[in-house]
Image (cartoon, helix red, strand yellow):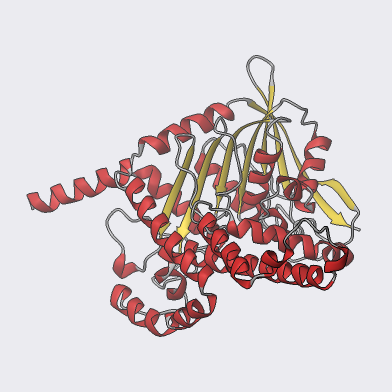
Amino acid sequence: MLATTLHGISDSLVKAYSLYSQAEQTARRVVNEILEAGIALSPTTALYGLAAVPLLTPIIGLARHGEFTPVSYTNETAWISDGLVAGFTSALTGAAISTSLGKLFTTLGKSKAKLPKNIDWEKYLDPTNLKKLDLAQVFKNLFATDESNATFHKAATLTAPLTSMVHGEGLDVYAITPHAALPKPESIAQAYANVDALTADSTSPGYATVCIQKLANANGKRSWIVTLPDSDNHLDSPCAASQTMQLMSDSSRQRLDSTAVTFVRKAMQDAGVKNGDSVVLIGASQGGLVAASLASGLKGTYDFTHVVTASAPIANHEIPGNTFVTSVEMEGDLMPNLDGAQNPVRESWLTVQGTATNEAGATDTSTPVAGTGNKLERPHGMNYQRAAWENAAQAGSPAVEEHEAHFKQATSGKLVSTMYYQGRLQ
């Protein structure tokens, strides 16, 4: 009994103080970079290896959880998902680069007579040199984490004209009055609850809605809480799912030009948010991407004190170190892995990593997830994100407590007003 008790205490201490998180992140980074390099060097071979996953995953799922569901595919490959995403997106980008270079050099070769005589064009036409360029790019990518974002940038550049044609270029932003108002979030847990409630029909009837709350501090200075919506399914919505590609770009300018960010900026201006005002941003999934795009792209315009996200691939968004970032991600949730990278490790950026399990695999320190049974599910919903944060808070982690204290300080003013905005593309 004593041994069992001490083992439980040691597990709790490891969890609360994240004693092995740095080593685990380093090991995962090494594995994923090696995997990425292998995929980039030989994508065809990697595809054959990936084809074996559907055969092995059911066996692993049965061994670990006593059951197999389609969700097992994402759960059992979560530890290599960053490498898979970065590797294949890097290969796609590399293929596009190689093809473009090949066409360029072929064109130059056909018009040698018109080229400057002091340039040895033959060496650029040499296939060996083209291969060296590919290898150099692969080597460079070993020290980078934004290969996926670079690919999204290229893809968004190509699809932007089509998106504008389908969705329209004009944007109408207007205030609405919801049937149910959101309370001022007094904690990060309440912030996640507000994100969950913002998607409900009573708060956001039909279209994505942004909630902007104005606070008045004791010294008379105003501050703001901006709760951002996830994507919706309307083609004429500024928060359509198609905006995710542009929000994932490695270009800050391209992210700020997205209709989702433009919608929020116009809503903030209409609500009265001024340059230099303190702003807390809260969002999940696409809403988290918008929050990170604002915090990284407009850091000189507003004072973004705290950013709270869930299930958002924001690792490569350059949010300044003086902005606190609190993120929740679930193992097996594909959305946070779209950037093919792990979140930065610093005191002002806390990432809570949750793992979903069935009832048979649950422990005494597990937190039940509302609205689920004992079956493994895709852990993307806010009920999973909220349970993961609750579990981390119950562990007594000093990092969690520090972020909670900072959030309470950033939102300590008295609630003056709450405004809601929707938008339509025209």
Q: How many marks?
A: 0
Q: Is 368 rendered above or below residue 58? A: above
In the image: residue 117, left or right of residue 378 = right
In the image: residue 254, left or right of residue 4 = right
Q: Where on the picture, by quarter, is residue 29?
A: bottom left
Front one among 12 and 349: 349
Q: Position of residue 375 (x, y in %)?
A: 41, 73
Look at 36% across and 44% down and name the residue there: 394
Front one among 222 and 205: 222
Look at 77% across and 31% down and name the residue there: 273
Residue 227 seen anywhere in this rendered image of the structure: yes
Which residue ends up furthest to the top in the rendered image?
A: 219
Q: Position of residue 230 (x, y in %)?
A: 67, 56
In the image: residue 19, left or right of residue 324 = left
Look at 83% across and 58% down and name the residue there: 116
Q: Position of residue 423 (x, y in %)?
A: 83, 52
Front one among 42 and 232: 42
In the image: residue 295, left or right of residue 142 = right
